[in-house]
Amino acid sequence: MYERLIADTIDSVNSEEEIPEFVGADIRNYIETIGILFGEDWEYSFEITNRYKYTKEDLEDLNYHYKISGVPDAGFKQASILTVEIAITGINGTEGSQTILVPLVKEHGHWGIGQQIGSVYDTRAAEGGYDIYDRLLDGFSFSSASEAENDE
């Protein structure tokens, strides 16, 4: 996925070192929007309310979608979709909340944020409604993987 990110982004930057800054612009825009709505000293909390674990058939579909998206060696053996309730509180008492879906894939023993692709994600997103990420996860994520002792 990293190689695909470089291939998709390199024409928009002068060097590979500029890619995190270029891709990070989307994240900064989200944070700035939250700051405008809730003030600079906003706080958040979240709760994972559901975790869907992909079945063998779901994984076949997901890997197929990665392959047709240009990742020929996709072969994820584990994936999940987290349903997360996020609550934001502004300094002036303004409150807001949102339910979001976070696609996860496990690669080389690490969990990372995946793409919003595949039949399972499409079905769950249609049920959940709101796409907080806009175009951020439509392409390949530069997301870091976390160390996981086990699958949970």
Image (cartoon, rainbow, N blue to C red):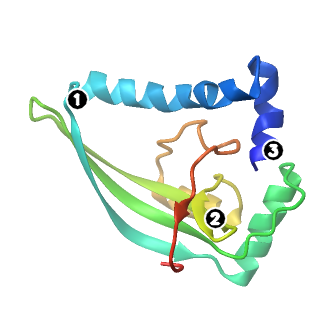
Q: Position of residue 33 (x, y in %)?
A: 37, 25
Q: Mark 1 falls on what kind of element?
A: helix
Q: Is residue 19 left or right of residue 100?
A: right
- Please state which of the two labelled residues, at mark 3 or mark 1, is closer to the viewer: 3
Question: Which of the 4 image quadrants contains residue 124?
Answer: bottom right
User: In the image, what residue type sits under mark 1?
Assistant: Phe
- Spatial separation of the CA atoms under disc 1 and disc 2: 32 Å
User: In the image, what residue type sits under mark 3?
Assistant: Glu
Q: Label 3 belongs to which residue?
A: 3
Q: Mark 2 falls on what kind of element?
A: strand
- The residue carrying pointer 1 sits among few (fewer than 14), some (14 to 19) or many (20 or more) residues within 10 Å by Cα, namely many
- Spatial separation of the CA atoms under disc 2 and disc 3: 17 Å
- Spatial separation of the CA atoms under disc 3 and disc 1: 37 Å
Q: Is residue 89 above or below residue 70?
A: above
- The residue carrying pointer 2 sits among few (fewer than 14), some (14 to 19) or many (20 or more) residues within 10 Å by Cα, namely many
Q: Label 1 belongs to which residue?
A: 38
Q: Position of residue 133 (x, y in %)?
A: 52, 41
Q: Quick one: label 2 or label 3, which is nearer the N terminus?
A: 3
Q: Label 2 belongs to which residue?
A: 105
- The residue carrying pointer 3 sits among few (fewer than 14), some (14 to 19) or many (20 or more) residues within 10 Å by Cα, namely few
User: In the image, what residue type sits under mark 2?
Assistant: Val
Q: Quick one: label 1 or label 2, which is nearer the N terminus?
A: 1
Q: Quick one: label 3 or label 1, which is nearer the N terminus?
A: 3
- Please state which of the two labelled residues, at mark 1 or mark 2, is closer to the viewer: 2
Residue at x 47%, y 42% (from the top left corner): 132
Residue that lies at the very extreme toward the top in this rendered image: 14
The label number, if any, that marks residue 19 in the structure image: none
